[in-house]
Image (cartoon, coloured by chain):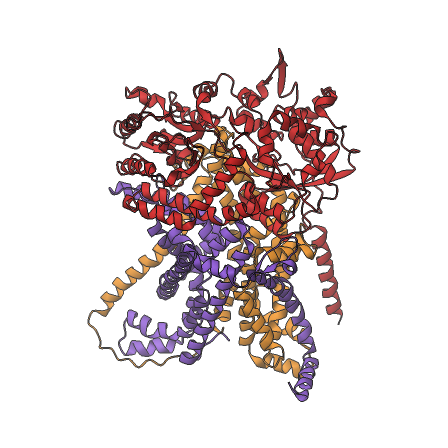
Chain colours: A orange, B purple, C red
Amino acid sequence: MEQHNVNHTPQKRPGIKKRGRVGSIFIYIVVLLAGAITLYPFIYVVANSFSSPMAVLRREVVFLPVDFSVKSYEILLNQKDVWLSYYNTIWYTVVGTAANILLTVLAAYPLSVKRFCLRRPVSMMIVITLFVSGGMVPSYMVVKSLGMLDTPWALIFPTAISAYNLIVTRSFFESLPQELMESAYLDGANDFTILFRIILPVSKAILAVLVIFYAVFHWNEYFNPMLYLKSRELKPITLYLRDILVANQQSTVSTGGNTSLEQKFLFEALKFSTIVITVLPITVIYPFFQKHFVQGVMIGSVKS
Amino acid sequence: MTKRHGSAFIKSLKRDKYLVMMVLPCIAFFVIFHFIPMFWNIIAFQKYNIRGGIFESTWVGLSNFERFFASPNAARVIGNTFIISFMDLIMGFPVPIIFALFLSEIKNKYVKRTIQTFTYLPHFISVVVVVGMMKIFLSPTDGIVNNIITSLGGSPIDFFSTAGVFRWLYVLSNIWQNFGWDSIIYFAAVAGINPELYEAAEVDGAGRWTKMFHISLPSISPTIITLLIMRIGWLLSVGFEKIILMYNEATYQTADVISSYVFRVGILNADFSYGTAIGLFNSLVSIILIAGANFISKRLSDTSLF
Amino acid sequence: MKRRWISLVLAALLAVTASACAPGTTDMPPASSEISEAASGVSSGTDKNTDSSTSGGALPLVEPGSETLTLLTYQNWHASSYYDADGGLPIENKIEEITGVKIEWECVASGDYETVAQTRLAAGSDLPDIVRVPKGAAGLTTYSNQGLFINIKDYMNEQTTPNLIKMFDENPIYEAYCVSPDGGIYGLPHAEYDINNYVVMWNIIRTDWLDTLGLSMPTTIDELHDALVAFKTQDPNGNGEQDEIPLGYQNENMFGLYTMKHAFGFNNTDTWSIQDDDTVQFDLADDKFLSCLTTLNKWYQEGLLNTTVDGSDSDMLIAQDRLGAQTISSMDNVIGKNDSVHLVNEDGNYEFIPLLANPDYPDNEPKLNKRQSFHDYYAVTVDCENPELAVRWLDWVYASEESSVLRYWGFEGDTYTVENGKKQFTDKVAKADTSAIDVMREIGGWPNFVGNENGECFMAMYVDSYCEQAYHDFKDVMIDRVPISIGTPEESETYSQKWPEINDYVKESVINFINGNKPLSEWEDYKAQLQTMGLQDIVAVKQAWYDRMKDIIV
């Protein structure tokens, strides 16, 4: 990272301390505002999810729950199969992320070694995939011909490596001091040993980054499960919740459809509790990774 | 490739044999799940026959492309894609930088960490949820925003159905969702600046703002430029999922972008060859853009992607 | 060295465990529900009330459990009862029992159906046995031309499909909607034909507000206008605030206001119409429509229209006692809206607005269009290993009397009883907390697949309700829509290539004309643009379709 030399001699200004305070207040306000506008929508959603369906439909909830009730959660969590879907999502996230990290790291290391003969061609190949793709239909056909359709593996293999994450990881490895690897090499270690015994232990930061990126991806994944999974037992919670929301919505406007009042209220209230259920786990887990994560992004990107 | 060159290559393969083993799964992955599907793009030049597949479909040359460019929608979707991307770039790109600079000024660690955490949150939620939340807040009859507007004496605005407003909505919500996350990189870069620079400037009498814009900003410019290049490369990739969730007939005129059009026409309408042709066009332009941006950057500042 | 082996073994163990507990491998206990147990208890005791002439071909169709058919279709419209649930739903289980054919479900939420189905069909191989074809008639033509579906006609005869043959005899309109120009039958349509003779779907208004304000039900377009102004300014909901929204919409969102065209010299309420000389016309490009738009635009400026284009807040406004009128509500939904209002205002009551007159067009007597009767087709794909079985299954499920009773009335003694030869629903269905249809859907009734909806059954859900009165008020003025028929490959290509964009453009323009974003002075440009986009080609196609069917439809 190059540093620019600044040759600057401003005049000394009178009352500089006073200016500083106004500036500080301004900065504080901006920053606090930023925090507030990002936090408020969540407060709104959570408050609505804990309000009675009637209050939700009438849009009476602004900041605190109105007519506190856990009815929408009750309904949601009492649906059949909701726990099964949750389990599925967790499985996809854990196994998927593990596979992602293994494969990404395994590929990033060789690409970070400058003398590697395949480095240029493979890097080229990866960058191309960032911009050109075949689309939904051919991807579906590939997954089908591999026999993965309607199996859990359809959500693991086709998304096993993200080109973007691969590039970031490669950069990170490149930024590590070369001496580390040189000396191990001289001691007769082979590349596998170097990767697992030397590189990974000092790469906690980038590993945290990868975990967060991939885990969030799997957790929110919706399109691929919709396309590749047919059986109910395999579906993750995102699809499950979508089924509920569509069923409710359809029944309020479909012709020859439903007239149920309860259904209408349900729909409004469910919107909020489903949001909370999908977002909650991530917000709970994230703080644990935060420390390493910030460090990792710092190093990984500054050098890229 | 001379014989000597070839055997040198094989020699280095042998020397790096473990590295090759490591990278093999990755190569296999990209070939199977990315390059093979890429062949599908051939149907852009065909009239696709479903049962026959690629091998039995008739060739129609460039007629799919001609059809696209002749359609009144072509100008509109291409225009919207560029406009929305530019807006996203110009408005969205500086915000994380400025936020990072500001946040770095805060001395209180506790406040800093907490605010940072709040600002990351939106990034983790899926776009479906974000749009759902937007619709709730911006509802003309009872969204909070319109409640404020009406209590101040104005009349309610139907944000999602006013064509002129759509692009702002899209871009501003992108900023909301991503500025915190994107600012991490810049924040980290600022934290890595040599403190001596600041000390020297202070001795010279520099105030806070001078320090910010004359030291911090220039110091992180390599990071900024790298990310800028990548953003430019993505100019044509306005994400279709969010557009599709947000648009409706009243806003097609300003909201319909290449990717949403391809989805609607190519997939939903089963007009596969046509949709693929448009998508191919999109990819080609993206490649040109990023190659161009990279080239310019290499010339101007030594920073480049590849 | 040892450490490395241990970690390898550990990794292998982890991998095996991960696979072992993968989704799909855990055994969940089959879901049980009160109704399903009761139903199976009741059904085993019930006589199969069939005589060979109605149920036709021998039942069960095959040795029970020996054959399976895969079916790709919408998921049930019930938030907690799924067709593919463990243990299945009672009515579908009964179908399996009677036909002997096991169904392997592939259900997709209706909102996502098109994307998923199009992708599956595009892949061209390993198709499900029976599929709900996306995109209706256009989809059927596209895919049948690509050779994806079998010709059901090849299998139609007295032995294999007695029920279908009988149905076509009694109601030639079914056949008219099934047959492709080349004479083949590639799909059976989801039929809301019979039921549409009863279901009124029209604009509604708060009659109690009219009473409060001393107004009578509007009979002309101007009277409606005045009523809407009164709603806005005279605070009919009595809360001291001017928060009433006089006219809103839901189905078809703001575009749905086009229905007002009936008061501007048009002979019907839909976007297409048949003129006196038997020609098909696209009414929204007719200059009389400009008068309609001008009026609506004026109403918009006067603040009489809801400004939320997608009408998604309609339910909320109703629940808040703020919505005065709404376009296009189906009559069973009116009941629901009334229930909704009653929670805040006991007197709240919506009823249909009559077809409005207009002194500017004194001789015009418009008719109310029924809902689209046939849409979305069910086809048997060429990948089906036993197409004859699939056709026989469809024959029984779609067209037999016994199936109709099972799927729409349910189980005798449990959900319906027969008194004096007339069927009626039991209290469990008719007087449930939720609606009758909801109760039926929970056990798999009124299904989303291979539908053939029964009108008499529908009305039986609304005995002694406003629906009966609505039916009487409107039955003499209801007519069919201009048909969307299965076309020749050329017609279908023209239609599917040009119509979607034209449709989008029309909706966009109408909405923007009404809310003023597009000045009415651009009317001629709008018409010209439609010509450029090929509207006349679409009209020609619809004319061809109409000519083919006009002798059969009423």
Q: Quadrant of residue C177?
A: top right
Residue C331 placement, left or right of C224:
right
Q: How many marks?
A: 0
B248 or C17, which lies in front?
A: B248
Q: Is residue B204 above or below residue C281?
A: below
Is there any visible trace of residue A107 in the rendered image? yes
Residue pictured at 64% horizontal, 36% vertical:
C83
Q: Is residue C65 above or below residue C348?
A: below
Is there any visible trace of residue C312 in the rendered image? no
Residue A196 placement, left or right of C553:
right
Q: Residue B14's x, y, as percent?
A: 70, 81
Residue pictured at 38% horizontal, 75% vertical:
B219
**Residue sitting at the far top:** C420
Q: Is residue B226 above or below residue A256?
A: below
Residue pictured at 57% horizontal, 62% vertical:
B41
Which quadrant of the rendered structure holds the N terminus of chain B?
A: bottom right
**Residue sitting at the far left:** A14
Q: Residue C98's x, y, as percent?
A: 73, 29
Residue pictured at 58% horizontal, 47% vertical:
C142
